[in-house]
Image: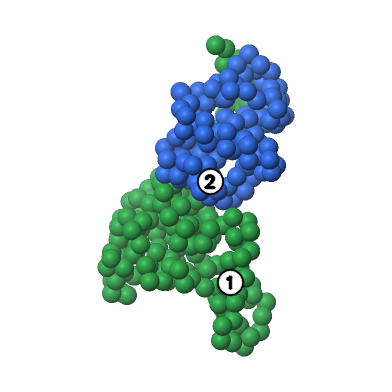
Chain colours: A green, B blue
Amino acid sequence: MTELLEHSASPTTAPETIEKVAIVISKGSLEGVYPGLIMANGARMEGVDADLFFTFFGLDAIRKDRYEKIKVATVGNPGMHLPTWLGALPGFSALATLMMKRQMEKIDIPPIPEFIELVADSGAHLYACKATVDMFGLTIDDFVPQVDDIISVGEFYEKAAGGQIIFT
Amino acid sequence: MTTMLIADAPVDVDAEGFLTDATQWNERLANAIARENGIDELTDRHWLVVHFMRERYLATGNAPSIRSLGKESGVPIKELYQLFPKGPAKLAAKIGGIPKPKGCI
């Protein structure tokens, strides 16, 4: 059978492509966690390898007891365009989180627990930062089963070798 | 947009080889595009995904997200990536003769 007979107008040298990314998630707010997850999922969708390294409060996104309770930061967040006192009212962060989650669901962005499962199932590897794990007195049992390992910064760089590192 | 000959049939494609007119598609074409993209033989599971992508696109005008592909096509995420290692949504769209999915998810 004849297949592609004619490759029209393809450039002689293909542009360089990204083959691998290592994404650091360092913040524990909703708006701090989502960008890294979206970029990791987006990488896998393009056939790009992805590793995720959770550090400091970013660890909340993979902690069994916290990953369902990630909230929008309504205080100290100029992007909210709200007076600080208003953002600090009881329940305000919960309300903002609820509203943002609704908007996200509309455009098919999953809640964090489902998103963690999605990126892990898509072949991305998830790691917890050893220094932070030790600082908070945690063990591997504190994390969701999708977490592959607790690794040091040095091991992270080894895994990231040959790819792009993205810090969020 | 350019015209390309795939499996002896002239079809309109974009710069990345996605069909720009979904009505020009047929299964013979799908087999040829799959081989060109590293999938030697389309199994029943591949076809399930390809048909789901295509039907969803024809019904709504948009390709489904990877999330709904995993939830609604009948093929879970892990298997989707085994079937289409270089990106399930993108590759199934290409094989199914619909435009490249535009969403971020």
- Regarding mark 1 in the picture, which secondary structure is present there? helix
Determine which residue is flagged by label 1.
A98
Q: Mark 1 or 2, which is nearer the eye?
A: 2
Q: Is residue A4 above or below residue A15?
A: above
Q: Is residue A43 above or below residue A56?
A: above
Report the residue at 28% width, 64% height from top. Answer: A140
Q: In front: A4, or A105? A: A105
Left or right: residue A141 versus residue A93 is left
Residue A153 seen in the figure: no
For the N terminus of chain A, the quadrant is: top right
Q: Position of residue A35 (x, y in %)?
A: 54, 60
Report the residue at 65% width, 25% height from top. Answer: B25
Q: Position of residue A79 (x, y in %)?
A: 64, 72
- Check residue B76 in the rendering and tell me which mark sits there, or answer none: none
Q: Position of residue A97 (x, y in %)?
A: 57, 72
To which quarter of the image does residue A128 belong?
bottom left
Q: Residues within 10 Å of mark 2 (few under 14, many from 20)?
A: few
Q: Is residue B83 above or below residue A140?
A: above
Q: Residues within 10 Å of mark 1 (few under 14, many from 20)?
A: some
Residue B42 seen in the figure: yes
Farthest residue, direction top: A1
- Whole-angstrom CA distance, mark 1 to mark 2, is 25 Å
Q: Position of residue A117 (x, y in %)?
A: 43, 55
Report the residue at 46% width, 23% height from top. Answer: B41
What subunit carries mark 2? B
To which quarter of the image does residue B91 belong?
top right
User: In the rendered structure, which amino acid carries the disc numbered 2?
Assistant: Glu
What subunit carries mark 1? A
Report the residue at 47% width, 58% height from top. Answer: A114
Determine which residue is flagged by label 2.
B72
User: In the rendered structure, which amino acid carries the disc numbered 1?
Assistant: Leu
- Regarding mark 2 in the picture, which secondary structure is present there? helix
